[in-house]
Image: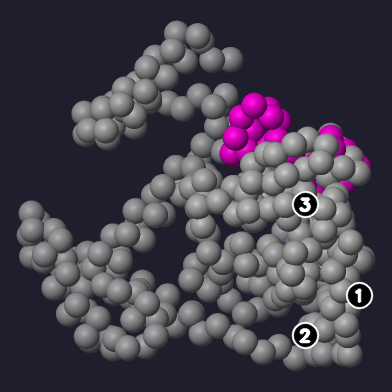
Amino acid sequence: MVHIDTLQHYFEIAFDYLDAGHLDSSSHRFAQLKDPDLLFLGHDTMLVSDVKAIWVEWFVHSILDLKRVNQGRVSGPHLAKQVMDGLEILTPGISDNRREELSKVLVPLILQRRRSETRRVSYSLQEKRSLLINSGKPARCWICGVPFPEWAKDKFLRREHEAKLPKFGDVFLRRGLKPRDLEVEIEHRVPFSAGGTNSIENLALSCGWCNTGKGDRKTIYDPSKTLMSVYHPMIGTFLAPCRFWIVRTLTFSSGCVTCGATTSEHELSVYIRNSGGVPVPPNLATYCREHHPLKEASVLSLDGFEQRRLNT
Ligand SMILES: [Zn+2]
Ligand SMILES: [Zn+2]
């Protein structure tokens, strides 16, 4: 239970921070506050971690261009020098000794990341078959739980196939727009950039739709980039969340809010809890097909809806 005074205090400081244009004094006060669970629905540690991860990434990027390092265009000794040079400019206030310590920690970590960045592009039929077997019965996308269509499995196993789009698609998942969205793709559960390996335990199958959404997103922020305006003949025009980030945030925690079904056996989708609000994480709930509030209406004829991506 959160006391009303505590909440009021929290919001006052939060609004103060927003209004003050991120001044140090107000951000300091805001950062010191204990976050009420009520607001973050138990996801507060994920939010804090995401913010920190972005800053760490920015810090490293401010020293050198990681892309060049990963492409092998910067050698080990060169890297050490570049890190020291960068730190000298970026951290003028610290002593040479401390700068050297920081560089000793950073250089091996950056190099280690580069080594693990040798992405594999081809997999044997044998590996593909066992991945399909390990992906459930029927084989499903490990992220959203959609069963893969037969033609997509045939294509994956390099058999003859003919790509077919379904007549109907999920309103919220926006699936079935292009054949690629339905294809079977191999994915690293823990990405290479985060130290993931090529071992079979780290591989999973996802639908193309989830895979493309996952790759370009490291945090769950910036929802405005992923909203789409959709016209639905029964509920009118609304903004729909698009892609992976929302599905991940929600399904990783609890599965279907009615029955607890998870993606290992069911296809999950999301729905706006409060239709007067924007579909951001606190305003979304996860449902299996059976319990989705829109029932059959969550699946629409793909010819029938009008869609437009916003801000992308
Ligand atoms: Zn999927
Ligand atoms: Zn359910």
Whether residue 179 is situated above or below residue 62 in the rendered picture = below
Whether residue 117 is situated above or below residue 291 in the rendered picture = below
The residue at which mark 3 appears reads as 305
Earlier in the chain: of badge 1 and badge 2, it is: 2
Whether residue 258 is situated above or below residue 118 in the rendered picture = above
Queried whether the magenta region covers residue 193, the answer comes back as no
The residue at which mark 1 appears reads as 150
The residue at which mark 2 appears reads as 127
Horizontal side of 283 relative to 72 (left or right) equals right
User: SS class of the residue under badge 1?
Assistant: helix
Q: Residues within 10 Å of mark 1 (few under 14, many from 20)?
A: some
Calculate the distance from the C-alpha at mark 1 to the C-alpha at mark 2. Answer: 18 Å
Earlier in the chain: of badge 3 and badge 1, it is: 1
Earlier in the chain: of badge 2 and badge 3, it is: 2
What segment is highlighted magenta in the picture?
A: 267-294
Q: Residues within 10 Å of mark 3 (few under 14, many from 20)?
A: some
Q: Taking the image as drawn, is residue 61 in sight?
A: yes
Provide residue 226's location: percent of width, then percent of height.
Answer: 57, 51
Asked whether mark 2 and ligand 1 are closer than 8 Å, the reply comes as no
Residue in the image at 82% along x and 58% along y: 302
Q: Nearer the viewer, residue 242 or 235?
A: 235
Q: Quadrant of residue 134?
A: bottom right
Question: What amino acid is found at the position of numbered circle 3 in the picture?
Answer: Phe
